[in-house]
Image (cartoon, grey):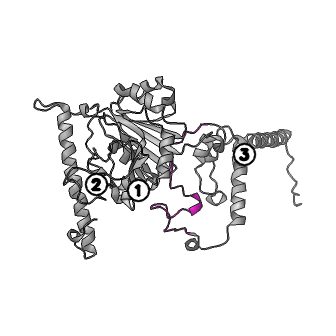
């Protein structure tokens, strides 16, 4: 009986056609997939983390939605390549940055990127940063103001040139109304109701913020400036080496208490005076010397850095500061003085005092004045105790020192 031979099965025509169609469909699908790939979201792809630096791709796609994903891939690949080329194979501990001389909290940053100071310069939202400023003001003047004194402040502002950055602290909450004055549109406005200039100064005039300014004017709102010019004033301050100063007060000024701050005729500057008997324990100490008041004080940059640290957070009226300003300059009887050739009038308008609260039939200003006196005593006590504690660590008795 013969053995049947095996023969290859003959492929049917419909199976061959199915194979051709399937192959063609696969080619078309691959082509379409390749064309659409650049628009795929990177966040939908499961890519190895080693391919790219540690970045938030979702953030990048949102922020730069106008760029294609392929362009982002190219940029990241370039960054990765540069990183591999430029980074030597150091251990992590060797690459770790720690600079103890950097500002506190910035020790992990390379010194070249640390920006520890700032300013109040207004900048644009467009263009090159280097072209933002047509002039860099060298001085700063701040007024603590209420809108009722707008005319007085407008007159005062005409005495300060474009060399001054202007900061207005608004204790009555009114700000936008000041834009009726053209200069106000270039000023810095800070508004917190019922706060004093020393409260503002402690919180908004940190020495690192006002570091670019050679002199800082800390002025009240009720000052007459008919006989005052800020640029001429600064010339005299520099000429006589004053780090803390004020303009002389006209004899018609309201509340003229101290002989030291009274304007003198026929002189540019004075640094000492004679007071009532018993008021001065030493002719080189306040209020006979090393003394100005706090209504229209002008500080050099270095002096302000010291004075700012002396301002107490909770003692908002500043009473007592004037007797201690001398602690921030050396020698104080030479570095503190009154400029007579540029003088002002203290109008004595109790506008901020009226921001107090009337209690038990007392006027609102009475409670404010009472707190001023209490703060003066509290500040004196704190300063005395702080000095006692310091001298105790040195084994000294401060009561045996004639001046400290």
Count residues near mark 2 (Cα–Cα under 10 Å), then give few for <14, some for 14-19, many for 20+.
many
Judge depth for marks 1 and 3 and give the one in front.
Answer: 1
- Mark 1 vs 3, N-terminal side: 3
* Label 1: element kind: helix
Q: Is residue 214 visible?
A: yes
Left or right for 29, reference 200: right
* Label 3: element kind: helix
Q: Tell me, yes or no, whether the highlighted magenta stretch contains residue 210.
A: no
Give the Cα distance between marks 1 and 3. 62 Å
Q: Residue at x 79, y 39 (%)?
A: 28
What residue span does the magenta drawing correspond to?
96-125
Residue lying furthest front: 266
Q: Which residue is mark 3?
A: 71
**Residue 83: quadrant of the picture:** bottom right
- Return the x and y of residue 255 as percentages of the image width and height: 26, 37
* Label 2: element kind: loop
Judge depth for marks 3 and 2 and give the one in front.
Answer: 2
Q: Can you say which quadrant of the picture contains the N terminus?
A: bottom right
* Residue nearer the viewer, 109 or 336: 336
Q: Which residue is mark 1?
A: 335
Magenta span main SS? loop
Q: Which residue is mark 2?
A: 286
Whether residue 188 is situated above or below residue 76 in the rendered picture: above
- Return the x and y of residue 383 as percentages of the image width and height: 25, 59
């Amino acid at each position: 009986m013969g053995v049947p031979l095996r023969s290859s099965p003959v492929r049917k025509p419909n199976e061959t056609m199915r194979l051709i169609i399937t192959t063609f469909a696969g080619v078309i699908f691959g082509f379409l997939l390749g064309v659409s790939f650049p628009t795929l979201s990177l966040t939908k792809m499961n890519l190895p983390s080693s391919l790219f630096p540690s970045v938030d791709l979702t953030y990048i796609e949102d922020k730069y939605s106008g760029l294609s994903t392929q362009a982002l891939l190219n940029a990241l690949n370039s960054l990765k390549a540069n990183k591999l080329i430029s980074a030597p194979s150091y251990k992590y501990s060797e690459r770790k940055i720690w600079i103890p001389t950097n500002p506190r909290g910035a020790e992990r940053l390379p010194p070249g990127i640390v920006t520890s100071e700032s300013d109040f310069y207004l900048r644009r939202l467009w263009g090159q940063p280097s072209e933002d400023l047509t002039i860099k003001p060298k001085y700063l003047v701040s007024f603590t103001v209420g809108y009722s004194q707008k005319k007085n402040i407008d007159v005062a502002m005409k005495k300060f040139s474009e060399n001054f950055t202007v900061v207005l602290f608004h204790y009555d909450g009114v700000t936008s109304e000041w834009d009726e004055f053209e200069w106000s549109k270039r000023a810095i406005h800070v508004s917190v109701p019922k706060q004093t200039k020393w409260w503002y100064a402690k919180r908004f005039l940190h020495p690192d913020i006002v570091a670019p300014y050679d002199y800082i004017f800390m002025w009240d709102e009720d000052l007459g400036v008919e006989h005052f010019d800020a640029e001429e004033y600064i010339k005299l301050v520099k000429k006589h080496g004053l780090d803390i100063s004020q303009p002389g007060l006209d004899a018609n000024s309201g509340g003229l208490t101290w002989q030291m701050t009274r304007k003198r005729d026929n002189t540019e500057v004075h640094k000492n005076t004679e007071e009532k008997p018993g008021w001065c324990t030493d002719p080189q100490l306040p209020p006979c010397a090393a003394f100005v008041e706090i209504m229209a004080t002008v500080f050099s940059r270095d002096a302000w850095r010291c004075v700012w640290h002396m301002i107490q957070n909770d003692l908002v009226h500043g009473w007592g500061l004037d007797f201690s300003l001398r602690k921030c300059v050396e020698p104080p009887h030479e570095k503190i003085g009154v400029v007579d050739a540029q003088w002002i009038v203290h109008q004595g308008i109790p506008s901020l005092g009226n921001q107090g609260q009337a209690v038990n039939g007392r006027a609102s200003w009475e409670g404010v004045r009472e707190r001023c006196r209490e703060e003066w005593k509290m500040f004196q006590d704190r300063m005395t105790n702080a000095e006692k504690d310091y001298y105790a660590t040195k084994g000294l008795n401060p009561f045996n020192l004639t001046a400290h």
